[in-house]
Amino acid sequence: MNGIPLTHILFVSTALFFIGMYGFFTRRNMITILMSVELILNSVNINFVAFNTYLYPQNLDGIFFTIFIVTIAASEAAVAIAIIINLYRSLHSVDVDETGELKF
């Protein structure tokens, strides 16, 4: 395969995952939370491609899962940005703590 060991790739993927988790749980800005979710999804994509390359290089299952996740992430980001824009128009803020003022 290539010259990069699997442990290095998994280390980068784990770092991205935990950076995303930290951002998701500690930030109050909705856009930052959305970016943290995207980091988590990208770390999963790195895992799929790495394990597919190192375990089953003749199959493309990991690549297909990655394409599926990228498609879902793009649609999720579009819907989330639309919701965030509408909340900003009504509340003039994208802070998560201020969304409690909404009455559904």
Image (cartoon, rainbow, N blue to C red):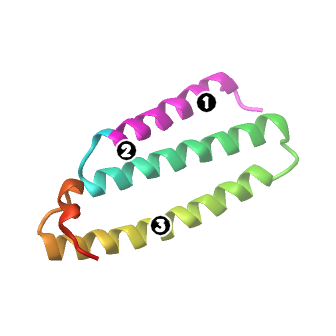
Tag 2: residue type? Phe
Mark-to-mark CA distance, 3 and 1? 26 Å
Write down the quadrant of residue 90 in the picture: bottom left
Q: Earlier in the sequence, mark 2 or mark 3?
A: 2
Query: Which residues fall within the magenta stretch?
Result: 1-25
Q: Residue 76 bears which disc, if any?
A: 3
Q: Which mark is residue 9?
A: 1
35 or 25, which is in the foreground? 25
Circle 1 SS class? helix
Q: Position of residue 87 (x, y in %)?
A: 23, 72
Mark 2 to mark 1 CA distance (whole Å): 23 Å
Q: What residue lies at 85% left-to-right and 41% top-to-bottom?
A: 56
* Residue drawn at the location 78% of the way across and 32% of the way down: 1
Residue farthest to the left?
92
> Quadrant of the image for the C terminus?
bottom left
Which residue matches tag 2?
A: 24
Q: Is residue 3 magenta?
A: yes
Q: Nearer the viewer, mark 3 or mark 1?
A: 3
83 vs 103, nearest the viewer: 103
Give residue 102's quadrant in the image: bottom left
Q: Secondary structure at mark 3?
A: helix
Q: Is there a contact, CB below 8 Å, between mark 2 and mark 3? A: no
